[in-house]
Amino acid sequence: MPHYRISEAAALLGVSADTVRRRVDAGDLAVHTDDAGRAVVPGEALAQWATERAAAPAQNGVSSARNRLDGLVTAITADAVMAQVELQCGPFRVVSLMSAEAVRDLGLEVGSRAAAVVKATTVIVEAPR
């Protein structure tokens, strides 16, 4: 079973190491000591904790898409017809191409809140070697 040091767990969750330590201290997240005497979080416990605490996104309607990343608009490049909208969603940069009309209709501008909703038939998963 994989184990992650506090800093690694924090990076995977997109939070600070102090946040993970507070969750450990509160008893919300299991921790063990590795052979070198360092605190490590079991991968299974980290996955379970992250899944249980995933916030249900607030939506005005219903959607079959389950991959929703809330973020901040960081750039918009538009011409008369098309636009490229960049969002920073936690540690992830998401880029979307849409019509310039959609940008106007959504009222998007740099600094505004938006959500990237992803629905795809193919998702590629990579793992470190």
Image (tube, grey):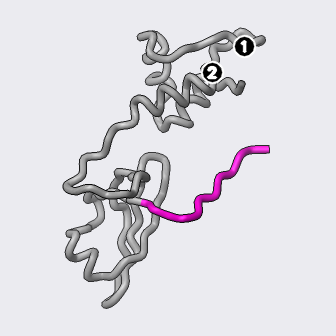
Report the residue that reaches farthest toward the right.
Answer: 129
Q: Residue 45 location, x and y as percent? A: 56, 22
Instruction: Please state which of the two labelled residues, at mark 2 or mark 1, is closer to the viewer.
Output: 2
Q: Residue at x 48, y 26 (%)?
A: 49
Which quadrant of the rendered structure holds the C terminus? top right
Is residue 119 shown in magenta? yes
**Which numbered dot is residue 42?**
2
Above or below 27: residue 99: below
Q: Nearer the viewer, residue 78 or 128?
A: 128
Is residue 107 shown in magenta? no
> Label 2 to label 1, Cα distance in Å?
10 Å
**Which numbered dot is residue 34?**
1
Q: Residue at x 42, y 70 (%)?
A: 96
Which quadrant of the rendered structure holds the N terminus? top right
Q: Residue at x 61, y 30 (%)?
A: 8
Q: Residue 104 location, x and y as percent? A: 22, 76
Secondary structure, mark 2, is strand
Q: Amino acid at mark 1?
A: Asp
Above or below 19: residue 11: below
Above or below 75: residue 8: above
Above or below 26: residue 3: below
Query: From the viewer's perspective, is 59 left or right of 99?
Result: left
Give the extent of the magenta segment. Answer: 118-129
Secondary structure, mark 1, is loop
Q: Amino acid at mark 2?
A: Pro
- Within 10 Å of the Cα at label 2, are there few (<14), some (14-19), or many (20+) other Cα atoms? some
Q: Nearer the viewer, residue 78 or 46?
A: 46
